[in-house]
């Protein structure tokens, strides 16, 4: 039986929301070195997909107000077609990744990227990205800042939010 599958590359775009400030200030403020405050997005089927305070959004790769990513990590390949992927994202946008569910420390862009990466490739995104909130909150300064940081919604400008409305982006 001949099985012809098309394979699609899957990339993780990684942005430092602090523009290098975390690397400089974290030792003084947190007592430990952080290389960045990471925002991530999945790039597949020629589009960048991310989650923020407005819900799930997409744009051309590198097309948000964040500009070009600080790094691009090859997550592998997927056989998931664009149609199936968009249906999957629509389902997530209607249930677990609505904009009002966004939380900087517990339910954020990196949580989304990690879940989508596992769906597409079976692999997680790097732990140094997903572990960052716990690392910050493990410090006295992180705990002191938590009430302020809890009120922050990150929603990079430039994306088209579709929130579970497949075909209505």
Image (cartoon, rainbow, N blue to C red):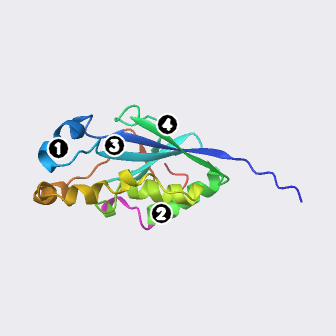
Across the whole image, how many numbered discs are drawn on residues? 4
The residue indicated by pointer 1 is 27
What crowding class fits label 2: few (fewer than 14 Cα within 10 Å), some (14-19), or many (20 or more)?
some
Element type where label 4 sits in the image: loop
How far apart marks 1 and 4 lie (CA) works out to 35 Å
In the displayed structure, does residue 53 sit left or right of residue 152? right
The residue indicated by pointer 3 is 156
Is 34 included in the stretch rendered in magenta?
no
- The mark found on residue 6 in the picture is none
In the displayed structure, does residue 30 sit left or right of residue 109? left
Q: Earlier in the sequence, mark 2 or mark 3?
A: 2
Screen quadrant of the N terminus: bottom right
Q: Earlier in the sequence, mark 1 or mark 4?
A: 1
What crowding class fits label 1: few (fewer than 14 Cα within 10 Å), some (14-19), or many (20 or more)?
few
Frontmost of labels 1 and 3 is: 1
The residue indicated by pointer 4 is 60
How far apart marks 2 and 3 lie (CA) works out to 19 Å
In the displayed structure, does residue 155 sit left or right of residue 161? left
- The mark found on residue 92 in the picture is 2
Residue 7 position within the rendered picture, expressed as x and y whole percent measured from the top left: 69, 47
Instruction: Magenta stretch: give its range.
Output: 95-100
Element type where label 2 sits in the image: helix
């Amino acid at each position: 039986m001949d099985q012809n599958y098309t394979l699609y590359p899957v990339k993780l775009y990684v942005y430092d929301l602090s523009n290098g400030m975390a690397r400089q200030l974290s030792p003084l403020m947190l007592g430990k070195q952080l290389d960045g405050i990471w925002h991530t997005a999945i790039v597949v089927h020629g589009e960048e997909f991310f989650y923020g305070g407005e819900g799930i959004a997409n744009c051309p790769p590198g097309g948000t107000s964040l500009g070009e990513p600080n790094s691009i990590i090859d997550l592998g390949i997927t056989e998931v077609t664009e149609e199936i992927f968009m249906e999957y994202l629509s389902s997530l946008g209607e249930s677990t990744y609505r904009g009002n569910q966004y939380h900087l420390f517990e339910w954020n862009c990196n949580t989304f990227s990690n879940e989508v990466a596992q769906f597409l490739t079976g692999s997680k995104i790097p732990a140094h990205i997903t572990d960052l909130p716990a690392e910050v909150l493990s410090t006295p300064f992180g705990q002191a800042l938590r009430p302020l940081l809890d009120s922050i919604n990150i929603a990079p400008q430039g994306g088209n939010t579709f929130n579970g409305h497949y075909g209505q982006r």
